[in-house]
Amino acid sequence: MPTEAQIAGGHKATLNNPNASDEAKQHSRQVLDNEFNGGDVPKSGDNEDKNPGNVAGGLKATLKNPNVSEEAKESAKERLDNM
């Protein structure tokens, strides 16, 4: 089941999606305003419920992905080093 942060994040993505209809954006804005204090929700657990092996695997994949910026790779390497 998605967390509040994930649900709010989906609505925020809709607002920023140039392919989303005006109706969809209006609905997402209403949901964020009415249910999520305008989208101001805490992050989803900040790694509390995440499997450390999966997190490390994702960070390693980031390092090997040629489509990822050098800045993102440096961030991933730092996070891996701190695990």
Image (tube, rainbow, N blue to C red):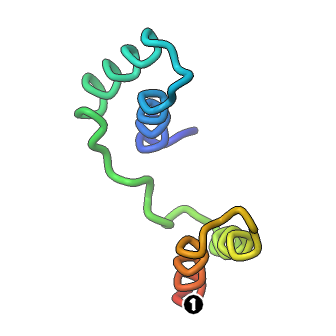
Q: Is 34 on the left-hand or right-hand side of 48?
A: left
Residue 51: % across, % down: 64, 68
- Kindly give the residue lying farthest to the bottom in the view shown: 81
Q: Quadrant of the C terminus?
A: bottom right
Residue 46: % across, % down: 44, 64
Write down the quadrant of residue 60 in the picture: bottom right
Q: Is 15 on the left-hand or right-hand side of 53?
A: left
| Disc 1 crowd, CA 10 A, few/some/many (<14, 14-19, 20+) | few
- Kindly give the residue lying farthest to the top in the view shown: 23
The residue type indicated by label 1 comes to Asp
Q: Which residue is mark 1?
A: 81
Q: Quadrant of the N terminus?
A: top right
Q: Residue at x 32, y 51 (%)?
A: 42
Q: Residue at x 42, y 40 (%)?
A: 4
Write down the quadrant of residue 50 in the picture: bottom right
Q: Is residue 32 above or below residue 53?
A: above
Which of 54 and 19 lies nearest the eye of the viewer?
A: 19
Residue 80: % across, % down: 60, 84
Residue 26: % across, % down: 37, 14
Q: Is residue 5 above or below residue 61?
A: above
Q: Residue at x 42, y 28 (%)?
A: 15
Q: Residue at x 50, y 13 (%)?
A: 21
